[in-house]
Image: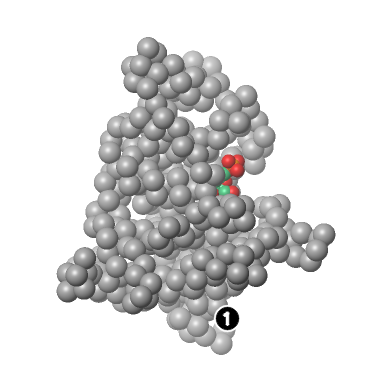
């Protein structure tokens, strides 16, 4: 693409501001997050040469996060990059991260803005040591009026309250996928110039699909409606679905969701008897909600298997939920299996 026709993220955001879709403060916040993702991309891209692979903590003493998951060095580094970039920017009142037990108000030494930022600094990081794509996921909410020092409770807004959401996928190319509520758009990092360039305006997920993404090793632990739904998928065109399906599972949500945004599919991390006591595996505030916002803005659908994801009322910063998202018609089918099961039992 010639440089004269390419649209940078900066130009795209200025045009969104001119269109009245965002204000200057949100535009600048998104630029700060994108700049932090470029720094993370450089660290991730160094791999073993950067001395940042492997587990955080000292030898034999793993560093664990609030999720009870072993932290990778790059988890900690990515979290620090996002915290530092956003502390002094002046656009945020507070932020929350998968890697932090509680949210943080912006330090008093810096001016505070009107937004709340939540992020998973490096989702899928268990893949980092085997060189599989990982990513940063972020979600932006308004800080409630009159709140100058936000606490966890001020972040507990449903997904419909998001004003922006996106992810950066660190794969063969580094791509930023973003919505501010007017479509879902993809930008590719031009490493020579150092800026994100618009490469897809208005991503559209095909309504129907023949591709599903789930960790099949959990099959025996699933709820009955999930067993039934996937069982029917696997019978192919001779079965009730009347078509053969393909399966993909990267075990990196950003990579799986990016594939679905690009060519369709359904992603599911359902309840299973292992994660059911926690409410699911994936986190609502900084995984399910931002991804669901992006998917809906691309013409897809996202539910918990029972209700629309974006309407779930959060009860905690690290609340977990079952996730079904992707091609609208397929998500509706999977959700119907769950609702019909509930109605019959
Ligand atoms: P499993 C990564 O740990 C993650 O949070 C998501 O990125 C991914 O979709 C899922 O968990 C993978 O889970 O049980 O297949 O390892």
Q: Residue at x 49, y 19 (%)?
A: 231
Q: Position of residue 211 (x, y in %)?
A: 39, 33
**Along the horizontal axis of the image, is 37 left or right of 68?**
left
Q: How many numbered marks does the figure carry?
A: 1
What residue occupies the far right of the structure in this picture? 60
The picture quadrant where one finds residue 59 is bottom right
Q: Who's the residue at 55% across and 78% down the image?
A: 84
Which residue is outermost to the top?
238
Q: Residue extending furthest front?
A: 49
**261 in relation to 215, above or below:** below
Tell me if 157 is positioned left or right of 300 in this view: right
> How many C-alpha atoms fall within 10 Å of the one at disc 1: few (<14), some, or many (≥20)?
few
The answer to whether one can see residue 103 in this image is no
Estimate the x, y position of residue 332 in percent, counting from the top left: 36, 30
Q: Horizontal and vertical percent for residue 194? A: 37, 76
Q: In this rendering, is residue 112 above or below 298?
A: below
Q: Residue at x 37, y 22 (%)?
A: 244
Q: Nearer the viewer, residue 331 or 44?
A: 44
Display coloring:
one colour
User: Can you tell which quarter of the image residue 330 is in?
Assistant: top left
Label 1 sits on residue: 107
Q: Identify the element where label 1 is drawn.
A: loop
Q: Is mark 1 within 8 Å of ligand 1?
A: no
Q: Residue 146, image x and y in percent?
A: 46, 72
Q: Residue at x 55, y 73 (%)?
A: 81
Q: Nearer the viewer, residue 124 or 114?
A: 124
Q: Quadrant of the N terminus?
A: bottom left
Q: Farthest left residue? A: 4
Instruction: Answer with the quadrant where ligand 1 appears in the image.
Output: top right
Asked whether residue 7 is in view, the answer is: yes
């Amino acid at each position: 693409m010639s440089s004269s026709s390419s649209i940078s993220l900066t130009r795209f955001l200025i045009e969104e501001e001119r269109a009245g879709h965002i204000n200057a403060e949100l535009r600048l916040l998104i630029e700060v997050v994108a700049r932090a993702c470029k720094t993370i991309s450089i660290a991730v891209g160094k791999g073993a040469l950067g001395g940042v692979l492997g587990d955080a903590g000292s030898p034999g003493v793993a560093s664990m996060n609030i999720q009870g998951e072993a932290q990778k060095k790059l988890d900690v580094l990515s979290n620090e990059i996002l915290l530092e970039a956003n502390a002094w920017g002046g656009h945020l009142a507070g932020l929350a991260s998968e890697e932090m037990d509680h949210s943080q108000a912006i330090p008093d030494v810096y001016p505070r803005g009107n937004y709340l930022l939540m992020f998973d600094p490096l989702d899928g990081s268990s893949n980092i040591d085997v060189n599989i794509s990982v990513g940063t996921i972020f979600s932006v909410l308004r800080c409630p009026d009159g709140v100058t020092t936000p606490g966890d409770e001020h972040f507990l807004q449903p997904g419909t309250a998001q004003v922006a959401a996106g992810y950066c996928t660190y794969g063969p190319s580094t791509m930023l996928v973003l919505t501010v509520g007017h479509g879902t758009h993809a930008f590719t990092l031009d490493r020579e110039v150092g800026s994100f360039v618009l490469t897809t305006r208005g991503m559209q997920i095909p309504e129907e699909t023949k591709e599903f993404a789930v960790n099949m090793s959990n099959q025996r632990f699933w709820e009955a409606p999930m067993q039934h739904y996937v069982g029917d998928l696997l019978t192919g065109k001779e079965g009730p679905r009347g078509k053969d399906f393909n399966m993909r599972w990267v075990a990196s949500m950003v990579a799986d969701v990016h594939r679905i945004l690009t060519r369709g599919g359904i992603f599911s991390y359902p309840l299973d008897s292992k994660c059911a006591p926690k409410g699911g595996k994936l986190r609502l505030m900084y995984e399910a909600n931002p991804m669901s916002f992006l998917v809906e803005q691309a013409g897809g659908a996202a539910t918990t298997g029972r209700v629309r994801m974006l309407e779930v009322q959060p009860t905690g910063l690290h609340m977990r939920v079952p996730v079904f998202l992707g091609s609208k018609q397929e998500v509706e089918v999977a959700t119907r299996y769950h609702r019909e099961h509930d109605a019959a039992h």
